[in-house]
Image (tube, rainbow, N blue to C red):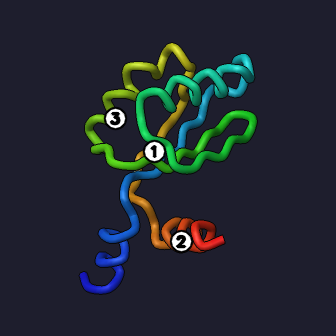
Amino acid sequence: LGYIQDLKNKFGNGYTINIKINSNENPENLSNLYNYLKNKIDIKIHHKTESTIILQVDYSSPPKLFDLIQQIKDKYHIETYIIEQTTLEQIFFSLQYSNI
C-alpha cells in the first residue's frame, strides 16, 4: 500500500456515485435528482445520460451517502446505484483539468 494509496489519500477526496433511474420515467427526474443532490452534498464533477448520472463528490462518508440515496430512491425512481472510492484514473483526469 505505498504510492497508489498515497495518491488516493492526497488527491482522491470523496467518492463516485453512479445512479441509474428507471428509463420509463420522466426524463426530468434525472435533472430533479441532480438538483436535489447538489443541495445536499458537495459535487465536484457530474456527467449525465438519458437515464444515468455519475457524480464525483467531496468529503462525505459512505454510510451518509447510502442513507441519502435510500431516502430518495422511490421518489426519484432509482433502479440501481453504486458508491465507490475515487479511482486513480479519476484522480489523473481531475489533476489534468485543474492545470488547464
Where is residue 59? Give x, y as percent: 33, 48
Taking the spot 75% from the left edge, 35% from the top edge, the residue there is 50
- Give the SS element for disc 1: strand
Left or right, residue 92 beside residue 30: left
How many marks do you count on the picture? 3
Seen from the viewer's position, the closer of residues 94 and 24 is: 94
- Give the SS element for disc 3: helix
Q: Amino acid at mark 2?
A: Leu
Taking the spot 39% from the left edge, 64% from the top edge, the residue there is 12
Where is residue 4? Give x, y as percent: 35, 80
How dense is the environment of label 3, judged by Cα within 10 Å: few (below 14), some, or many (20 and up)? Answer: some
Q: Amino acid at mark 3?
A: Phe
Seen from the viewer's position, the closer of residues 99 and 71 is: 99
Q: Amino acid at mark 1?
A: Ile
What is the C-alpha distance between the residues marked 1 and 2? 23 Å
Question: Which residue matches tag 1?
Answer: 82
Question: Which residue matches tag 3?
Answer: 66
Question: Which residue matches tag 2?
Answer: 95
Nearer mark to the viewer, of 1 and 2: 2
23, above or below 10, in the image? above
26, above or below 99, in the image? above
Tell me which numbered mark, 3 or 1, is placed earlier along the sequence. 3
Left or right, residue 7 beside residue 26: left
How dense is the environment of label 1, judged by Cα within 10 Å: few (below 14), some, or many (20 and up)? Answer: few
